[in-house]
Image (tube, rainbow, N blue to C red):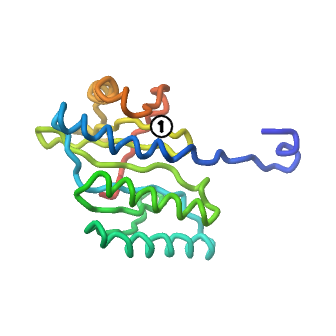
Amino acid sequence: MGLRDIFTGRGSVKAPAAQERLFALTTAYVTLEASYSITSAGVAGIAVQALATSDFQAVLKDTEEVVRATAGDFQATVESRDDEYGFRWVIVRTPGVEDLVVAINGVSSSIESGGYGERLLCAVFAFKDAAGAPLNFIYNYKRGTWYPFVPAPGDKEHNTERELQLKAQIGDELPIEAELERWFPLWGIPF
């Protein structure tokens, strides 16, 4: 924050990091599936900090329409939902990880080109292990890094040991967030 920001009472919001890191999941998935029997659950979502302005709502509507129009090319469905914390989610369902990444990138690119890139929070890609237990890989747009999130039984519990194991297994292929305190658990993911 600079001196001008202090006087005007405005701070700057960090813009999203380079999105090519998002595509690292497409190659890391080969290792996840082949070496660790982790498969895609066929769903991903992007969380956006919503604004009540008509311009922002129009950008989101246009984004969803574009993704819906192109989703037919790879047999995907698209829906929009608000979570209990007030964040808007654009959710894509399709069996192919590559198609999920392309669709999520399309959503984030459209929101950025509409001038609201700073409102992008994260993208969540759902997976399951060999036993069918859920696990997620979360892409943080502000930092351009990934981290695993493994829900555990109980109220708002996560399996830290399994998350660290996943970091060790895939850390060479995904740009994993080095600061563990930035591995925020996401509760109430609407898929």
The mark tally for this picture is 1
- Where is residue 65 drawn, in percent x and y? 44, 76
* Residue 138 figure quarter: top left
- Where is residue 115 drawn, in percent x and y? 64, 62
Please name the residue shown 54% across and 57% down the image: 49
- Where is residue 190 drawn, in percent x and y? 33, 58
Please name the residue shown 29% across and 29% down the image: 166
How many C-alpha atoms fall within 10 Å of the one at disc 1: few (<14), some, or many (≥20)?
many
Assign a secondary structure to mark 1: strand
Please name the residue shown 51% across and 75% down the image: 62
For label 1, the residue is: 145
Please name the residue shown 40% across and 35% down the image: 147
Q: Tell me the quadrant of the picture where the N terminus can be found.
A: top right
Residue 186, above or below 158: below
Residue 173, above or below 7: above
- Where is residue 55 drawn, in percent x and y? 63, 74
Residue 186, above or below 45: above
Residue kind at label 1, given as amino acid type: Thr
